[in-house]
């Protein structure tokens, strides 16, 4: 897995009603019940405007190690990106803090070329840049996925890269309410951690995570 990040976006969007598909989670962008949010959604009010702590993982060519490309509006392409590499990470910052409100609070964009080539990453947030807290994530992909294999989006939830390029994965800070060292009314940092999808990384329930 080699997560490539374009950008993070602060949004205010109401909750969506989900319809069950093959797995228990929301389906691909454009399908009934999908939670995917387009990069052109009018509810977008801000984009990440700075970065810190970029650590490139294994097998990332230097041409893809430009963290500034994670800033600003997502373009929905596979070129204007920064790659994290296997186990890499990056933290994006917001001069306008993200506040918990009704429905989704922010969205992450990745660069999958289709609905099933999903290279997954954990999502963590912080209100002080020091203490980070991870969203729960779930994977029901049963077997190892080859380098060009497929992940059914209805089998995964809580990752930064559930949808194809141009469509974002939304997150609700309500899920983290009550954590003593996190101010959900003033989140300033979002960190993405690449998942090495060979089963050594696990989801919230302890199940192995598989991705290309």
Image: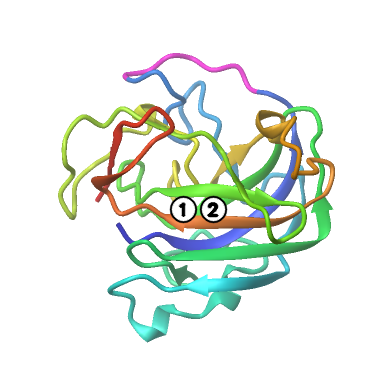
**x, y percent for residue 3:** 40, 59
Please say whether residue 21 is one of the residues in the magenta stretch: yes
Of the pair 18 and 147, the residue shown nearer to us: 147
Provide the major secondary structure of the magenta segment.
Answer: loop
Any magenta on residue 12?
A: no
Quadrant that contains the N terminus: bottom left
Q: Residue at x 50, y 62 (%)?
A: 5
> Which circle's residue, 1 or 2, is located before the other in the chain?
2
Label 1 or label 2, whichever lies nearer to me, is 2
Helix, strand or loop under label 1: loop
Q: Which numbered tag is attached to residue 32?
A: none
Front one among 122 and 163: 122
Residue located beneath label 2 in the image: 109
- Label 2: which secondary element: strand
Residue name at image x 48 percent, y 47 percent: 122
- x%, y% of residue 165? 46, 53
Q: Is residue 22 left or right of residue 88?
A: left
Residue at 15%, 49% (x, y): give it: 146
- Dots 1, 2 in contact, CB < 8 A: yes
Residue 101 shown left or right of residue 69 in the figure: right
- Residue 165 image label: 1
Q: Residue furthest bottom?
A: 62
Q: Position of residue 176 (x, y in %)?
A: 68, 34
Residue 20 in the figure: left or right of residue 178: left
Please provide the residue range marked out in magenta.
16-22
40 relative to 49, above or below: above
């Amino acid at each position: 897995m080699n997560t490539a990040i374009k950008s993070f976006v602060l949004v205010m969007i109401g909750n969506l009603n989900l319809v069950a598909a093959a797995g228990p989670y929301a389906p691909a962008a454009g399908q009934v019940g999908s939670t995917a949010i387009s990069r052109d959604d009018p509810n977008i009010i801000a984009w990440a405007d700075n970065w810190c702590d970029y650590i490139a993982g294994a097998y990332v060519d230097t041409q893809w190690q430009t963290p500034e490309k994670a800033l600003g509006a997502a373009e929905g392409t596979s070129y204007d990106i920064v790659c994290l590499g296997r186990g890499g990470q990056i933290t994006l910052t917001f001069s306008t803090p993200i506040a918990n409100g009704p429905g989704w609070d922010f969205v992450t964009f990745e660069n999958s070329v289709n609905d099933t080539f999903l290279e997954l990453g954990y999502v963590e947030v912080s209100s002080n840049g020091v203490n980070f807290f991870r969203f729960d994530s779930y994977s029901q992909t049963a077997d190892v996925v080859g380098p060009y294999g497929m992940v059914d989006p209805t089998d995964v939830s809580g990752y930064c890269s559930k949808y194809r390029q141009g469509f974002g994965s939304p997150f609700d800070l309500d899920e983290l309410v009550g954590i003593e060292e996190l101010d959900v009314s003033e989140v300033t940092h979002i960190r993405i951690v690449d998942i090495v999808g060979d089963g050594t990384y696990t989801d919230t329930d302890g199940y192995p995570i598989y991705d290309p």
